[in-house]
Image (cartoon, helix red, strand yellow):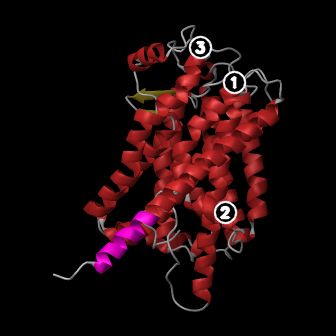
Amino acid sequence: MADSRTGSEFFMPAKGCLEGSAGEGLDVKANASAALSNMRAVVIVIVVAFHSALAYLTSAPATTAPFDQTPYLWQAFPILDPQRWLGFDLFCIWQDLSLMSLMFFLSGVLAAGSLRRKGSKTYALDRLWRIGFPFAMACIFLSPISFYPAYLVRSPDPSLLGFWRQWISLPFVPSGPQWFLWQLLAANLLGAGLYAIWPAMIERLSRIAAWVGDAPLKFIALLVAASALAYIPLAYVFSPWNWDAIGPFSMQLCRPAHYVVYFFAGLTLGSYGLDRGLLACDGRLARHWWAWLVAALAAAGAWLGMMWLTQPVWSAASPAILIAASFSYPVACACGGLTLLAIFLRYGGGIRLALLDSLSATAYSIYLLHYPFVVWLQYALLDSNLIAPAKAAIVLAGSLSMSWLISVGFSRVAAGSNVVAARRAASSPTR
């Protein structure tokens, strides 16, 4: 995961060894690459676990509303199981605070080298192919497969024809978890467009990263300030919970600008290099991971407390409470994301396991493929008397293993095709 990568998004597989000068600098950079690669492997497991647990939240709706009834809560909760466990609520809240923002951040870290190497036009075309095309295919093919069980538990007519009629009559195109892809694509294209207009952008961002240096407090102050400006006005107006969609482009209304901030924050650090500043495995951020963990827990607790003060109706709370509650999110998000990054920079660089390497290399494909398996397994377990943790464990194991095996198969077929093509090219007579 460095300048030699072919893509900027966090889930793309890493390629080859890192380039660098001989000696200690190369070792540090390689360790940073290994740390982020291992982090990618763990993050994809967390993503699948998050979706696997949604059917068993105590805070989820108690009953299933009709499939064609607004606000179409089946998009978030396709299956609602009678077995629930509070532990999953805490897990999902923790991940919702910072996981997606961290993925945009890391995508930005990896974008700087790609923009420098490819240029804005080639980079943008590559992103359209590697993010935009899979997003379109997922919306067309995977989303109907994923949400058919949601229709089965909400409609007296279980036929495919009945499902299709309701599906095409929806006022939007359900994208499921693939919303991440179009917003990631938008951030990438924005970065490419700015780089085309302002070729000195990467170098100027590198100067900012150099100014921040190895000072996490300085960086987090800038990140929280920018995130607050992007998040608070939208959260104040729309609340932290509301989603909307135009066609297949669904979004959580308070967060799109916030995600862009995190992408460009990552782009700033990535322009300075993986082996330098806050991304160094022996830097202050990594060494003081425990302090960031304490800060993350405290910030998450403060956010929960502020959210409690806004219940039961967001708009009914006082303006002061709404602003304070909105501000608590950028703080909790930054602390949580930097904590995970710090832990992996500190301890993940020296770990090399074939299992983690495989998960890291196939993480993007797993993200694309896992959701249909998650929903269908949750549906299959509805009538089981197993407790919620056991059901979620089965869903996680089944969906992760199936999407992983398919991804490995795809990667081997692609690798074989590349080898055959290379051999044919080598054996072709020179004209």
Residue type, mark 2 in image: Leu
User: Helix or strand or loop: what does disc 1 sit on?
Assistant: loop
Q: Which residues are magenta?
A: 416-427
Q: Measured from the top left, where is residue 410 in percent x and y?
A: 49, 55
Would residue 237 be seen by someone viewing this image from the given angle? no
Query: Gap between marks 1 and 3, in whole Å?
Result: 16 Å
Which residue corresponds to mark 2? 356
Which of the two marks, 1 or 3, is nearer to us in this view? 3
Is residue 46 toward the left or the right of residue 82 in the image?
left
Which of the two marks, 2 or 1, is nearer to us in this view? 2
Tell me the residue at 66%/63% (across/down).
356
Q: Measured from the top left, where is residue 30 in percent x and y?
A: 59, 78
Q: Measured from the top left, where is residue 133 in percent x and y?
A: 36, 46
Point out the residue furthest to the top here: 156
User: Helix or strand or loop: what does disc 3 sit on?
Assistant: loop
Tell me the residue at 75%/36% (across/down).
392
Q: What numbered label is drawn on residue 123?
A: none
Q: Residues within 10 Å of mark 3 (few under 14, many from 20)?
A: some
Above or below residue 220? Residue 21 is below
User: Helix or strand or loop: what does disc 2 sit on?
Assistant: helix
**Callout 3–callout 2 Cβ contact below 8 Å:** no
Q: What numbered label is drawn on residue 154?
A: 3
